Image (spheres, rainbow, N blue to C red):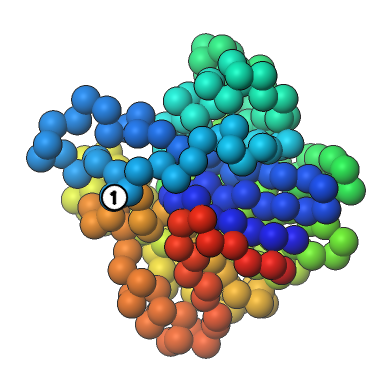
Amino acid sequence: MKITFYGQCTFLIEAGGLRIATDPYLSDAIDRGQPPESPWHRAFPAPCTLSDLKPDVILISHAHGDHFDRESLKPYYEAGGQAALYVPEPILPFAAKLGLRAIPANADRKIEIGGVTITPIACAHQKLRQDDDGHFFELSYMIEYEGKRVFFGGDMTLYDGLTEKLADMQPDVLLLPVNGADYYRTAEHCIGNINFIEAAKLTKKVGAKYYIPAHHDVYFPYNGVRDSWILDAAEDAGVDVHILKVCESEEL
C-alpha cells in the first residue's frame, strides 16, 4: 500500500490497482470571500486537482466544507470522473443538493472493492451524532488490503470503546488529525479534533506501527500544529510518527 498526503485530511491510498482518495479538499473554497484579517486563508495553494489524482474511490468522513468540498468534487465529476463516492448515509441529501451522486456508507457495513475491504467506523467529531435510523453523521474508515490496514480518522475525537475497537482491528498505520480543540476556537464555531498528544497515545494503545498526522497544515497557524510539538509528543509516548509534507508518499 502506498500513502500520499495532499494537505488537511486529503490522502491518496493506493492498494493493489485501486486508488482511494479521502476527504479531497483541493480548492480555496473556504478562503474565498474572507477578509484579509480572517484566519481562513490557505497556507499554501492546492497542490493539484482531484482529476489529477485519478481516484477509483472517494471516501468522505463528514459534511464540513474542508472535507466534503464541492469545489473539488464538482469539476471532477463534470469532467467525466467515475470514482465511487461514499458518504455517511445521513448526508446523502446534502450530496444530492450539491448535484453529486453518492453511495451511502454506514458504520460496520463493509465495502468490498477490487480486493480491498473498507470498514466504516462510527466517528465523533466532538460527539457521536446519529439520525433517526441510527446512522452516524460522521465516519472514519479502516482500509485493508492483503493483510495491511490503514485507519483514516477524518475529523475525530475519542469516545468510550473506540480505542478497544481499533486495537481489535490491528491497524498498521493511523492517519489522524492533530489540531486539537480549545475554548476560543470552539467559541468561533471551529470544531476541534484529537490533539497531537492524544494521537500519539492512541497509536501506542492500539499497537499501530506509527501514525501520520493530518489537519495541521492548511490553516496554520490558526488551526494547525508545529512539527516540533508532534515529534515531542510522539517521543514522550514512545511511538513513531511520520510527518509527510504535501505530495510526499511512503510505502507500507
Q: Residue at x 32, y 48 (%)?
A: 44
Q: Is residue 75 left or right of residue 59?
A: left
Q: Is residue 111 left or right of residue 97?
A: right
Confirm whether residue 200 shows in the render. yes
Q: Nearer the viewer, residue 160 or 213?
A: 213
Q: Residue at x 33, y 77 (%)?
A: 228
- Tell how many labels: 1
Disc 1 marks which residue? 43
Question: Horizontal and vertical percent for residue 165?
Answer: 70, 61
Quadrant into which the N terminus falls: bottom right
Question: Horizontal and vertical percent for residue 121?
Answer: 67, 48
Residue 197, located in which quarter of the rendered image? bottom left
Task: Check disc 1 and report its element: helix, strand or loop.
Answer: loop
Q: Residue at x 59, y 32 (%)?
A: 51
Q: Nearer the viewer, residue 158 or 249?
A: 249
Q: Residue at x 23, y 48 (%)?
A: 185
Disc 1 marks a residue whose amino acid type is Ala
Confirm whether residue 105 shows in the render. no
